[in-house]
Amino acid sequence: MPNILVVEDSPTMRQLISFAMRRVPNSRVIESTDGVDALKKLSNEKIDIILADINMPVMDGLKLVSLIRNNDAFKEIPIIIITTEGAEEDRKRALALGADDYLPKPIQTQQLVKMVKDYLGIKA
Amino acid sequence: MKEEIPILRKAEEFLQIFRKGEEFTKSLLKENERLRFRVAELEEELAQSTNESRIKNYKERIRMLEAEIASMKDRFNEVERENKDFAKRYIEVEEENNNLANLYVASYQLHSTLDYEEVLKIVLEIIINLIGAEVFAILLVDEKNNRLIPVAAEGMDKDSIPEMEIDSGLIGEVVTEGEGYFSDEMVRLKEIDPRNPIVCIPLKIKEHVIGVIAFYSFLIQKTSFSSIDYELFNLLAGHAATAIFSSRLYTQSERKLSTIQGFLELLRDKPGK
């Protein structure tokens, strides 16, 4: 059963992403409101993929990506960034820090579902 | 001599019989030859007629198989067309499904609380995350003074937005007409004029306009409006209006209730003192 960690401060986006992830077979969504909370969840649960926002209180998404990529226990986990920052330089910055993919808001949920399935090796 | 004559006669008779036998044998041989020839002829005819009928049969079979292939090709093309239609329909249904999920989430969030400030925050969140707006403001009608008061904004300072007359300008027109305004192009103005949004939608409870959402700029990746955007605009026009209105009333009534309770407690305490 793949565990999907959704790191997002907006309850609306958290609900929307969790709702979309119902289409990933047998998956379980674990929600986090910021980077610090996400790191706690990572320590307590086996996470298969992370969907993270950039602009969040306490710890932003980019800092979270950087910490995860520098931690041997978590560095292999795929990370997809979902953000309002749509400029090319923001994308490049996130990918350079170690994010695997970058999806600007407003998102097409079918695109996100496909991406997650691809990273988890689930055939459509 | 007399004895010789019967012997000769008998010999002659025997010879004749023999000759007849010879003739008969010859005629039998001839007949046999003729019959053999006829048999050979018939066999050849029969062989020829079998080949022709086989060829005829094969030709018929080929014709039938060709017809069958043609019919199967037609069926295959038909199934392929159907497949394409189904694939197209599947994409449409999936898109519709996603749109409905967006609308469900937006509607669910809007009615998840009666706290006025929280409702305003949720409206801002929906607009940022689901529509992709960057700079926008929510203005509510102050019916006592016939003015539009800014109550929340994103991407700009709320205090930089002036109060506006409800019967003048582009925003005033949206309030009086109750119809949304959409500019022809999603222009990104360098300087934002609070009185001239690029999109303005009324917040309506039935036909009563309680305010507007004015959009001044959209995210860089948002280059056009999709059908779901218009659905969300409609949803916001109705559901956000109800949520804002009811939460404002609830918050006001809560405030009034605590004031009245305070007074009652004061009155109760007074006679005892």
Image (cartoon, rainbow, N blue to C red):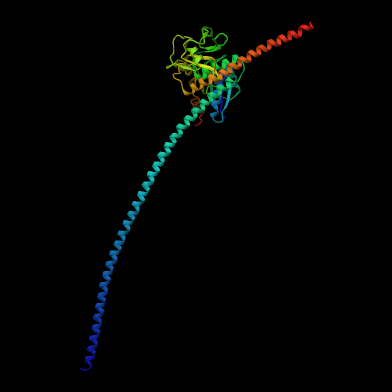
Q: Return the residue nearer the eye: B18 or B34.
A: B34
Q: Return the residue nearer the eye: B45 or B4.
A: B45
Determine which quarter of the picture holds residue A36.
Answer: top right
Q: Residue furthest bottom?
A: B2
In this view, B11 is above or below B242:
below
Question: In the visual, does B269 lie left or right of B211?
Answer: right
| Residue at point 40%, 43% (across, down) | B72
The location of residue B106, given as percent across then percent down, is: 55, 21
Question: In the visual, does B271 lie left or right of B161?
Answer: right
Question: In the visual, does B80 lie left or right of B45?
Answer: right
In this view, A122 is above or below B206:
below
The location of residue A25, given as percent across then percent down, is: 54, 31
Q: Which quadrant, please, contains the C terminus of chain B?
A: top right
Q: Residue furthest left?
A: B1
State the count of labels: 0
Determine which quarter of the picture holds residue B259.
Answer: top right
The location of residue B149, given as percent across then percent down, is: 55, 10
**Is residue A8 something that shows in the picture?**
no
**Is residue B261 something that shows in the picture?**
yes
Q: Residue furthest right?
A: B272
The location of residue A115, given as percent across then percent down, is: 49, 26
| Residue at point 26%, 77% (across, down) | B24
Q: Which quadrant, please, contains the N terminus of chain B?
A: bottom left
